[in-house]
Image (cartoon, rainbow, N blue to C red):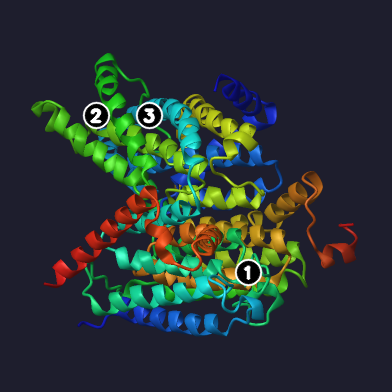
Amino acid sequence: MIEGILIGLKTALSFQNLMMVMIGCFAGTIIGMLPGLGPMTAIALMIPITYGFDPATGLILMAGVYYGAVFGGSTSSILINAPGVPGTVATSFDGYPMAQQGKAGKALAIAAYSSFAGGTISAIFLLIAAPSLSKVSLSFRSPDYFGLMILGLTAVAAFSSKGNFLKAMMMCVLGLMLASVGQDTLSDIPRFTFNTMNLSDGISFVLVVMATFAMSEALTIIIKGNDPAKAAKQISLTDLGSIKVNKEETKQMAATIPRSSVLGFIIGVLPGAGATIASFLAYGMERNFVKSEEKEKFGKGSVQGLSAPETANNAACSGSFVPLLTLGIPGSGTTAVMLGALLGFGIQPGPRLYETNPDIFWSVIMSMYIGMVVLLILNLPLIPYIARILAVPRTFLIPMILFFSVTGIYLMSFNNFDIFLMIGIAVVATILRLYDFPMPPLILAFVLGGLMEENLRRSLLISDGSWSFLWDRPLTICILIAILLIIAWQLYGSFRKKS
Amino acid sequence: MKINSVKIISLLFFVLSAFYLYTAHQIQVFAFDEGAPFNAKTFPIYLGYAGMFFSGLKIVLPDQKPIEVDPTYLEFKKTILLVLTMIVYGATILKVGFFLSTSLFLVFSYYFLGERRWKYIIIFSFPFVAIFMYLLHGVLAVYLRDPLLKYIGIMG
């Protein structure tokens, strides 16, 4: 492991990669700060750029963007009570009241220190857990992988959008349908191409991510008439107050951070759970841990109420990399986007990544930690300046997002058809978003589509067409039971509502 | 059962899944693959059934979180104008070239969204695209097709 860490450090600390972490954190903070635009949009906008670099550098850039976007989301939560992503909603419960009390700088500092501590602790957990789990997952067979992918999809559908399980499952199926367009990987038989050459290679992953996130989020802001800049005008973005944290506050944070980190990391590892659930659970847990007089302060600017969700959501971000790096199965929408990008580089994450591409495996883990340091020493002092981005009116912001989306696809294919297809998917995604159809399950399914079909193919061929492979091995049975429990629990909820 | 927009979307999804299933059955596989445990149409057929199953349930079961969008609060005009601008942009980018089509796309988009400060509209369109092109084409050596600039002699 020490050797791996050194390889990772060597790669991550090269001048180019250090620059990429800094640029990624900076760009991620700016994009993540804009309400409505989260880490997935930030990473989606970066994908065309990353294809110009080697895989390790590209991934390091994306990891930087990810952390930057989460930090940026917290900033808009605290300053204007407009969380960029669901994962930072709990941050606004106590962060925004602090900002209203004239302690915006302090709230941002607490958020940054908590994020840093949560990220650091969970990076250590990741360092220990990932190689061990990689070794365990070498014993996994195709039926287990197929089961894990179904489990990932159902878990994301169940947890990522409470009360919308069927809608989320429909989005999963739609994602798998989109992934099935193009030539069959084994026989090269065209499927759903409607005799169009443009579809014979399938639909580009970048196109789907850009359309369903960057572009449709921009169109949703327009159609709903939201203007993020309006909220920003209500507070002074240049005078955020002191960023110093006193002894008492440090003491309070010191008690909160370890437990929220552990909780966040564990929740992050679970497929589908992610930063949102981690931050809410940490907030709830912290409320139960503190003394009754401190409990009264929750929701009114409590240091622990702010520190807990911030620590947990960053810890969960690191945790979500565990299934991606060790099993090759993303546990969240954001890591699904990263998996898609990895596949674009020709790299298959999974247990073998640890052996075949140790530089990538370790450099991503190390760059996460470096990203945390960059966020703390670079972004925190620059926040008063970066925060001004919140005042950019949508009249300029939206066309820029659309421009980067269209250009990203144009530079990859030089093809009108792809641009039209992207606009079409974006329009459909915007309508679906208006009616609360979640997009992360669609992306996760789109990325997993090919792998799922491949593992199902192998499983069915081994068992001579029988579905008995689902209960042949104890591990597969456990996965199957977990899937059935999730589906039964969700459908029971629907029926109970009816009765 | 109450008919609402979500049910209509679910019904459309049901029809799409049925069409997908029909098309999946039409996929021509090799003769020796016809009776194989798994061929090119196996997975799509399962997907078609799964789509019909979930959308069918959504149609039949009541909504846990009923959601109705009031169309009077939606900015259809701006959104449609923006989408049309993107379509025109997509149609002209190869023929007219990156510089002019992108700059005009930005100008029209800013204008349609309500921006009237022409100084900023101009700064964040033509010069902005020129700098962007220079970075891509000149610094990063990314090829950008632009027949217009080539004709004028600015681009090689």
Residue sitting at x 18%, y 70%: A495
Residue identified by numbered label 2? A304
Kindly identify which chain the residue marked by label 1 belongs to.
Answer: A
Few, some or many residues within 10 Å of mark 3 (<14, 14–19, 20+): many
Q: Residue at x 46, y 31 (%)?
A: A132
The kind of residue tagged 2 is Gln
Residue B120 image offset from top left, x and y in percent: 60, 55
> Is residue A92 depicted above or below A17 in this figure?
below
**Foreground pick, A303 / A363:** A363
Q: Residue furthest top?
A: A247
Residues under labels 3 and 2: Cα distance?
13 Å
Q: Position of residue B142 (x, y in %)?
A: 78, 52
Is residue A110 positioned above or below B37 on the image? above
In the picture provided, is A145 more to the left or to the right than A347? left
Give the residue type at disc 1: Asp
Dot 1 falls on a residue whose secondary structure is loop
| Amino acid at pointer 3 | Gly
Dot 2: element: helix
Considering the numbered disc 3 on the image, is that residue within a helix, a strand or a loop? helix
Q: Report if residue A364 is visible in the image.
A: yes
User: Which residue is the site of mark 3?
Assistant: A118
Quarter of the figure with the C terminus of chain A: bottom left
The residue carrying pointer 2 sits among few (fewer than 14), some (14 to 19) or many (20 or more) residues within 10 Å by Cα, namely: many
Q: CA distance from mark 2 to mark 1?
A: 53 Å
Residue located beneath label 1 in the image? A184
